[in-house]
């Protein structure tokens, strides 16, 4: 596979985030029914002692006991901190991904500074495991910053925009709360504002994407956010 377009074009795609409200929706079968499932952050279907149901631990993975909630298929994995993995972390995670038929990694936090050390980690993963790593082009990132009124998009928004541009047959979005918790309270709002993130801009962008595109659907919780902003 040589491009993200080869993975998603003409296929049904689900992009699964890590919002806490996923714990309240039983949709594992729905998620796995898609031809391609792209998972972000730590939403991965295998057991880990550090698992916490509300996803407040970056190292938490989804045990199979909860597959009725989250599903098990992982066609592509998009961790926002991929370039900063250690070699040990890479050797622990990548084989488990490959075992579950993960076909590629997506680096979608393009605005981070990536130095020589981080590039060496990406090269190590490619060379040792022969798994492609795709990244949204810088021009797309610039376009999205403009669309968000010159604020930084959150990684999940950039990922959604990246996948959408490559013509999936259908696109289902779930697990995206744009830093709202289960009580609709902004998480770490002060930090995000300092970093030029404005969560409402991302929610509005996603709302407009759904409103303007026939083949994009979202879960009920995300639709509630759209209606209340």
Image: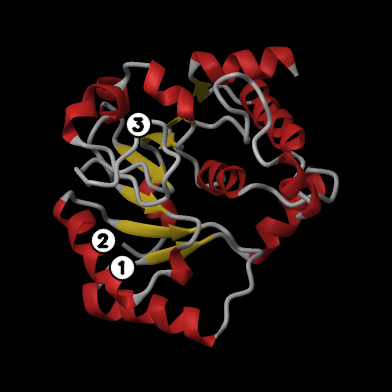
**Residue projecting furthest to the right:** 149
Mark 3 highlights which residue? 53
Between the C-alphas of marks 3 and 1, the distance is: 22 Å
- Rendered view: 179 above or below 131: above
Residue at 26%, 30% in the rendered image: 71
Q: Secondary structure at mark 2?
A: helix
Q: How many marks?
A: 3
Label number found at residue 89: 1
- Which circle's residue, 2 or 3, is located before the other in the chain? 3
**Residue projecting furthest to the left:** 99
Quarter of the rendering occupied by the C terminus: top right
Image quadrant in which you'd find residue 168: top left
Image quadrant in which you'd find residue 46: top left
Mark 2 closeness class: few <14, some 14–19, many ≥20 residues within 10 Å: few
Mark 2 highlights which residue? 93
- Rendered view: 17 above or below 158: above
Label number found at residue 114: none
Q: Secondary structure at mark 1?
A: helix
């Amino acid at each position: 596979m040589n491009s993200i377009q080869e993975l998603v074009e003409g296929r049904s795609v689900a992009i699964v985030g890590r919002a806490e409200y996923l714990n309240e929706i039983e949709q594992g079968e729905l998620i796995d029914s898609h031809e391609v499932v792209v998972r972000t952050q730590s939403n991965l279907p295998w057991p880990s002692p550090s698992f916490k149901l509300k996803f407040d631990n970056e190292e938490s993975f989804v045990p199979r006991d909860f597959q009725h909630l989250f599903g098990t298929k992982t066609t592509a994995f998009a961790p926002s901190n991929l370039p900063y993995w250690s070699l040990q972390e890479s050797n622990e995670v990548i084989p488990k991904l490959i075992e579950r038929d993960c076909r590629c990694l997506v680096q979608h936090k393009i605005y981070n500074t990536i130095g020589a050390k981080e590039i060496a980690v990406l090269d190590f993963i490619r060379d040792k495991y022969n798994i492609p790593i795709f990244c949204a082009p810088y021009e797309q990132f610039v376009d999205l910053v403009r669309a968000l009124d010159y604020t930084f998009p959150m990684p999940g928004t950039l990922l959604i925009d990246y996948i959408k541009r490559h013509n999936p047959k259908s696109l289902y979005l779930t697990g995206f709360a744009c830093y709202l918790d289960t009580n609709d309270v902004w998480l770490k709002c002060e930090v995000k504002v300092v970093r030029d993130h404005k969560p409402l801009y991302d929610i509005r962008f996603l709302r407009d994407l759904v409103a303007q595109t026939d083949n994009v659907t979202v879960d009920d919780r995300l639709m509630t956010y759209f209606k209340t902003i």
